[in-house]
């Protein structure tokens, strides 16, 4: 039973074995007409058999009333109609019973056997009655015409209801199959919609994480250097005006760089506002993927967008200008990498230096970069700060997301990220990124 059928049954359930009250009313009406027909025909049967008329009438009523069971037991109704055929009773019951039998879900061999029995019984009864009519003079036809008349009558009373029932049964099964397919398709569409919503929610969460990581990388490093320079500026403002002016210029340059990077990032977000708005209105997922792919393609075609490995030297110089004792060493021959690889390498070094400013101010730091055949490796290691346990003199806050963000970036490219304290009391951040990313 399909969902549609279950709804229909619940909405209009009928009594006993009927699915609907309309079907029950139809069967009861047909049974009443059949009982009345058999009761009338029972009068002639009683006279021919020499029985009291009430006996034939009651027999006809009960026999004709069995048509009410046509939906529950069509075989029994057909057998009863075949049984009373010699009494020339139950023609309506035979026609309706054969139609119901052919339209049912019973095996074809049972339908064919009962239809054959009905044809044979009708042929025999018609043939015998016609012979008796010719003998008694009630019929004035040639004797050779009787077989043709018998065959025609038998087929005319049996074939049409059987063929119509087979057609209606096949049509009903086809409609049931179509309903099941429609219900199955509806369930699949609901499931696909749920999965699409889950994928969209996952994509939104990933994008939020990525944006938060980018904002952290852009803001944390620049602002940390600005705070360090501001603290140095405050310390030397009166003692060394020339150095104070230099530090003030550095603070201004770093502030402008931070603002520039923030504007670029906000520009990307604004360009995606239309897409996000459409996605919230159930735009097909394929359109969202296509737009994201196009944006990624444009980003890959623009190597100037985002930091690169070539800017690491400048990054180290900025930290050195802020008072950090830092040294950069490069191994291997530099070559071009995918923009995602270069940006991730830059961000890892940048965040590691930021952490040194925050947690180990004044510590000597070593930045190592190695270009290998199939990967690029980087390591930022700082020695213990001059005063153990002392944080940055500028009091820089820490949100605890730097190491997590670095690991997420490297893992997304299929690389390996390791961080932790050294035996000497310092801290080391190491990352290895494949040179070719999918």
Image (spheres, helix red, strand yellow):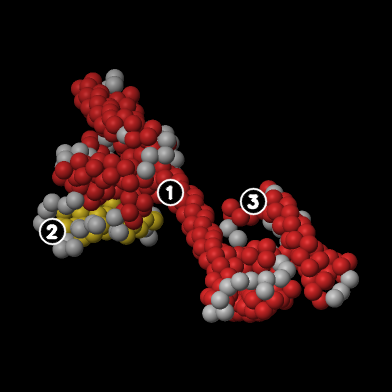
The residue shown at (27%, 37%) is 323
- What residue appears at the point 79 percent right and 74 percent down from the top-left corner? 48
**Depth check, front residue: 162 or 286:** 162
Q: Is residue 116 above or below residue 197?
A: below
Q: Is residue 76 visible?
A: no
| Count of all numbered marks drawn on residues in the image | 3
Which one is in front, 220 or 118?
118
Look at discs 1 and 2 and give the one toward the viewer. Answer: 1
| Mark 2 nearby-residue class (10 Å; few <14, some 14–19, many ≥20) | few
The first of marks 2 and 3 along the sequence is 3
In the picture, the quarter occupied by the N terminus is bottom right
The vertical placement of 171 against 289, above or below, is below
Q: CA distance from mark 2 to mark 3?
A: 77 Å
Callout 3: few (<14), some (14-19), or many (20+) C-alpha neighbours within 10 Å? few
Q: Which residue is found at the position 37% from the left and 56% from the top?
A: 419
- Where does the image place residue 397, in percent across and percent down from the top left? 43, 36
Q: Label 3: which residue? A: 8
Indicate left or right for 297 with 91 as reference. Answer: left
What distance separates the C-alpha of mark 1 from that of mark 2?
A: 46 Å
Q: Tag 1, which secondary structure?
A: helix
Please state if 230 lies on the left or on the right of 154 as rendered.
Answer: left
- Which residue was labeled with disc 2? 332
Q: Residues within 10 Å of mark 1 (few under 14, many from 20)?
A: some
> What element does badge 2 sit on?
loop
Q: Which mark is residue 196?
A: 1
* Any part of residue 245 in sight: yes
Query: Can you say whether 404 is above or below 223 in the image?
Result: below
Q: Please report contact status of discs 3 and 1: CB closer than 8 Å, yes or no.
A: no
């Amino acid at each position: 039973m399909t969902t549609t059928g279950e709804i229909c049954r619940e909405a209009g359930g009928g009594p006993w074995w009927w699915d609907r009250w309309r079907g029950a009313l139809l069967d009861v009406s047909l049974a009443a007409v059949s009982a009345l027909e058999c009761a009338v025909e029972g009068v002639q049967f009683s006279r021919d058999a020499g029985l009291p008329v009430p006996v034939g009438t009651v027999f006809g009523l009960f026999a004709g009333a069995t048509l009410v069971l046509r939906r529950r037991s069509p075989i029994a109704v057909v057998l009863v109609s075949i049984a009373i055929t010699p009494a020339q009773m139950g023609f309506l019951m035979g026609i309706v019973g054969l139609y119901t039998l052919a339209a049912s879900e019973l095996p074809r061999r049972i339908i064919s056997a009962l239809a054959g029995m009905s044809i044979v019984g009708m042929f025999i009864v018609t043939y015998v009655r016609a012979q008796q009519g010719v003998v008694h003079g009630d019929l004035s036809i040639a004797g050779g015409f009787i077989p043709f008349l018998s065959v025609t009558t038998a087929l005319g009373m049996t074939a049409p209801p059987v063929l119509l029932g087979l057609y209606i049964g096949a049509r009903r099964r086809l409609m049931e199959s179509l309903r099941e397919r429609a219900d199955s398709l509806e369930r699949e569409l609901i499931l696909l919609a749920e999965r699409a919503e889950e994928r969209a929610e996952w994509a939104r969460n990933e994008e939020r994480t990525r944006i938060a990581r980018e904002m952290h990388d852009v803001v944390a490093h620049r602002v940390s250097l600005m705070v360090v320079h501001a603290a140095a500026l405050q310390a030397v403002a009166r003692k060394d005006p020339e150095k104070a002016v230099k530090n003030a210029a550095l603070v201004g340059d770093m502030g402008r760089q931070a603002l520039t990077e923030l504007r670029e990032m906000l520009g990307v977000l604004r360009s995606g506002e239309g897409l996000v708005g459409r996605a919230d209105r159930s735009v097909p997922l394929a359109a969202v993927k296509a737009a994201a792919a196009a944006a990624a393609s444009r980003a890959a075609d623009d190597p100037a967008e985002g930091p690169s490995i070539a800017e690491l030297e400048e990054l180290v110089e900025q930290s050195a200008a802020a008072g950090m004792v830092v040294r950069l060493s490069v191994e291997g021959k530099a070559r071009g990498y995918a923009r995602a690889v270069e940006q991730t390498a830059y961000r890892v070094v940048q965040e590691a230096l930021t952490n040194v400013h925050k947690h180990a101010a004044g510590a000597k730091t070593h930045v190592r970069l190695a270009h290998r055949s199939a990967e690029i490796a980087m390591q930022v290691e700082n020695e213990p700060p001059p005063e153990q346990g002392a944080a940055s003199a500028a009091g820089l806050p820490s949100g605890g997301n730097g190491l997590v963000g670095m690991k997420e970036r490297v893992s997304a490219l299929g690389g390996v990220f390791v961080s932790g304290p050294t035996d000497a009391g310092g801290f080391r951040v190491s990352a290895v990124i494949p040179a070719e990313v999918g």
